[in-house]
Amino acid sequence: MTPATVSIGAQFINLLAAVLLLLSFAMLSQRRILSLIDLFAMQGAVLFVSTLVVAFTTGQVHLYYSATLTLVLKVLLLPWILHRLIRRLNVKWDVETLINIPTTMLVGIVLVIFAFNLALPISELAGTITRSTLGIALATVMLSFLMMITRRKAVPQVIGFLAMENGLFFAATSATYGMPMVVELGIALDVLVGMIILGVFFFQIREQFDSLDIRHLEQLREE
Amino acid sequence: MELTAVLALPLIGGMVLALVGHRRPAAEINAAFSLLTLFAAAALTARVIAGGPLTAYRQQFFVDSLNVFLVALTAFVGFTTALFSRPYMRVEHDHGKLTALRLRLYHSMFQLFMFTMLLALLTNNMGILWVAMEAATLTTVLLVSLYRTAASLEAAWKYFILCGVGIAQALFGTILLYFAAEKLLGSEGSALLWTHLDTVKAHLEPTVLSLAFVFLLVGYGTKVGLVPLHNWLPDAHAEGPTPVSAVLSGLLLNVALYAVVRCKVLADGALRSALAGQLMMGFGLLSVVVAAFFLSRQKDVKRMFAYSSIEHMGLITFAFGMGEATASFAGLLHMTVHSLTKSAIFFAVGHAAQKAGTQVMDNIRGLIKINPTVGWGLMLGTLAILGMPPFGVFASEFLILTSAMRQQPWATPILLMALGVAFAAVFGKVQPMVFGDTSARRLPHPPAILPVFVHLALVLMLGLWIPPYLAEWYRQAAKFIG
Amino acid sequence: MSATTVILQLLQVVVGLALAPLLAGWVNQCRTWLQNKSAPPLWQPYRQLSKLFHKEVVLAHDASPLFRAVPYILVACMALACAIIPTLSTDLPFAPAADAIALVGIFALARVFIALAGMDIGTAFGSLGSRREMLIGFLAEPALLMVFFTASLISRSTSLATIVETLAHREFAIYPSLAFAGVAFTMVSLAENARVPVDNPATHLELTMIHEAMILEYSGRHLALVEWSAALKLYAYSCLGLALFFPWGIPEGVGLANFAVAVPALLGKLAIGGFLLALIETLSAKMRIFRAPEFLGTAFLLAVLGMLVHFLLEKGI
């Protein structure tokens, strides 16, 4: 019961993890696309700070690089690209009607409990100071997944996809202090290229349907 | 050296083709690079046959009996597809379905796709394997939506989102794997190297590994097209250009399955239980049955053969899941023959659909009159894929069924029934397409039919006689999977 | 129980009764500043109260005795709440009674009576306000309980005094679960005190009002008491929030020196809290009544998340 058993650095990371979870729920309930992008950028910022704190408390030098990578890619570049896309596609005021937010939230809670239970045996095996956040990372991944399922528009689906990647990155930092550098670089490259391809893709969808509503994309199915 | 060439050639090819653009020789350059890659792959294969497994670049790459045969297969199918796509894409361009700009995109992305496939096969790093698999999705997304029709956009979107989600699960699995390995191998880059993991697999934490394998199987299984994660596959195959369907079916699915098999070897070592195999058998059997029943409901020819791919991938997954030398041998053989046969079928279907101007099977009739070679190619390919003797598919399916009879007798009737349903469905639909009445005139341009018959000849040969070094090679790989 | 503790206990109630209108005035002043209007003086609520106290009480023909009793019950409930929430010290005679669940019960009691009073006369507005109030209350209460449970899980007790002692006088530790609970508590407080996103105390527009609709029929002395109790409720919630989330400065002992620390600390924290409340009210827009369940559902969800996070992250703490 004494607080001294967990260092201040770890406590701070725990707090950031909690904020990350909070942001995931905020994204789940957000109707406006622009606010969604801001929330995504905030998630990236939290990720950056937490990686920095982990790097500082554990002295893992390569985490500084991945923190920088996070800052550049997820806080600055991707939100910028998304903002530009939104401006160019002129979907700024797209307000989405979601299916019943409280229900989504309740499903989210169930997912969080599931994720915590799943992660519990694993985090007990971990030797890192951040091990208890593994459950939150998994919960973030699942909530992003839920967001992708419940959204009807293309841009929020993609933000959900990117948020999922954020959760995975957080999992990597919290369980193992980050993946080897070469892998992290590869993942970052994939995300960036994926984003650019999606940008192209948005224009194609827009050109074809005059809207980014995914409901247009439900023609192909088994009779 | 050969390894560098195998990887560098398609990469350079992609860049060169991006520069060459839509000028006349782009298709020839594409074929030439594919041919060079094939030569490099052949040289690499020869070296591995002579000298055994090797690693390169501080162990970041490694070649053994399992992946070298897939490298050779990938390079070969890549080359024949490039040959096929040369006239095929030109006709599409002439019909006004494609602009010159999109043709450039196609050629460049084709080579880059080959690069990601070969990288996924050759890398020793489980993390890089993930990166390459994701990159393979990215390079093909724009190819699937090449025609920019509503349906193709939808297919590409589904493909991107589903495979993106799936591959994210695989990343989580990879993280868990790294997490388990880091304790034994240290946090230096070596903890994700497959060769290192293989040596310590018996000491990996079983709880972590079982969870990691579930995530990896679901993740890479999405790309394999295992039911219930298969939704993207029929759409992407049906709506993309035919050469892309051929490489997706013939190569991408194989490579994804290769990733699953690599993970299974690790999980088996750590778990001391049959969990990994049972999961794979379950997914495999489900895929076979579901796909077989969906086959009869298809109207689009490419869509139907996409379901057939799901069925065969399920069969192979089942075979690897049984995990015994004969079954794995059969799985590897089936991977090879399916890859060759299915791409041959897609080549023939491509010509037929191009001629008919539609992919709806009811509107494609009398291929035998329009162009006998295309008609016979489709008919023989269909017979081969349905497991008629003396083609290679018969041999591998026979082996899989007999080992199932020995190890999992309960599954045999299910498999037999599914194969029977598939036979009835596919044959019933292809027969009128080939021999039905038609008023259409003959095909105006010569089809690129050589690849079809080369593939079918190889499949026929594998059914009658497997060259001893190939058999030896399968046996080594099977031993090490089993 | 020494004489000083009794005095301190009395003092805590008196300070509450005296400060509550001031807090209300301060929030109003901040809000008008933020809206670039000229602010009413800080003591405006006192003036209002004294004006109302001097006015004649007008009762409807159908008013029952209950209608007349309710203002006194309200003030009594709120004064009791102020007495048991640890504001000036954690070691007071009423501390054993300062149970979180009991506190929720006291608030619920006040709510039931004001809703009954709203329906007593039988006007349309009164019943409308009461119904809305009960809707909000029924959603806010579980969320409030969850907030308390999160804090109780950390301190292993539902006694408010123990919670404050645990949080304020132990070695410093970061509790992520409290961050969730804090946000949830803020949302619940806004709804319970008829503040902007849920209700607007400054409007008498029939479509939107909740609290004002219930007390439309009150006048004179009764209205003064109802207004005072509303101010007390705001004060009680503020003190509760401070006690749970910013407990530093609430002394354990009962000495005079402690008291000298406690009062300025309280005043400072209340001033900041009031300003933040005004800021929230200025920045947010009143939402439709049908969105209120969503708002409070989110509060409940956050409180539950706080508990879950506690189980995951704070096992070692």
Image (spheres, grey):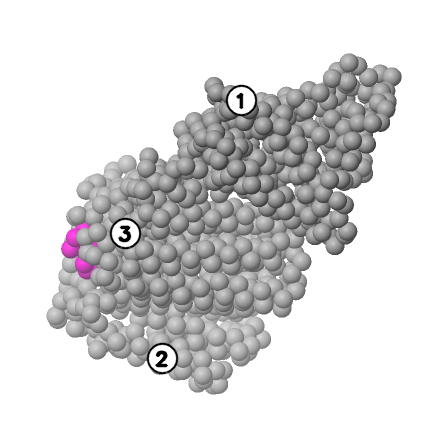
Label 1, secondary structure: give it.
helix
Q: Is disc 2 in contact with disc 3, using a CB cutoff of under 8 Å?
A: no
Q: Is residue C160 visible?
A: yes
B343 relative to B393 in the view: left or right:
right
**Which residue is nearer to you in this view: B186 or B141?**
B186
Residue type at tag 2: Ile
| Residue C120 position by quadrant | top right
Prevailing secondary structure class for the magenta stretch in the rendered image = helix
Residues at marks 2 and 1 on the same chain: no
Q: CA distance from mark 2 to mark 3?
A: 35 Å
Q: Chain of mark 1?
A: C
Q: Earlier in the sequence, mark 2 or mark 3?
A: 2
**Which residue is nearer to you in this view: A75 or C200?**
C200
* Residue C301 numbered tag: none
Whether B196 is among the magenta residues is yes
* Residue B179 numbered tag: 3
Whether A79 is among the magenta residues is no
- Magenta region, residue range: B194-201
Q: Which residue is mark 1?
A: C6
The residue that appears at 42% across and 52% down in the rendered structure is: A167
| Residue B378 position by quadrant | bottom left
The residue that appears at 24% across and 63% down in the rendered structure is: B189
B399 relative to B140 in the view: left or right:
left
Residue C273 vertical position relative to residue B253 in the rendered view, above or below: above
Q: Chain of mark 3?
A: B
Label 2, secondary structure: give it.
helix
Q: Is residue B459 visible?
A: no
Q: Which residue is mark 2?
A: B12
Residue type at tag 3: Phe
* Dot in front, 2 or 1: 1
> What is the x, y in percent for residue B316?
30, 52
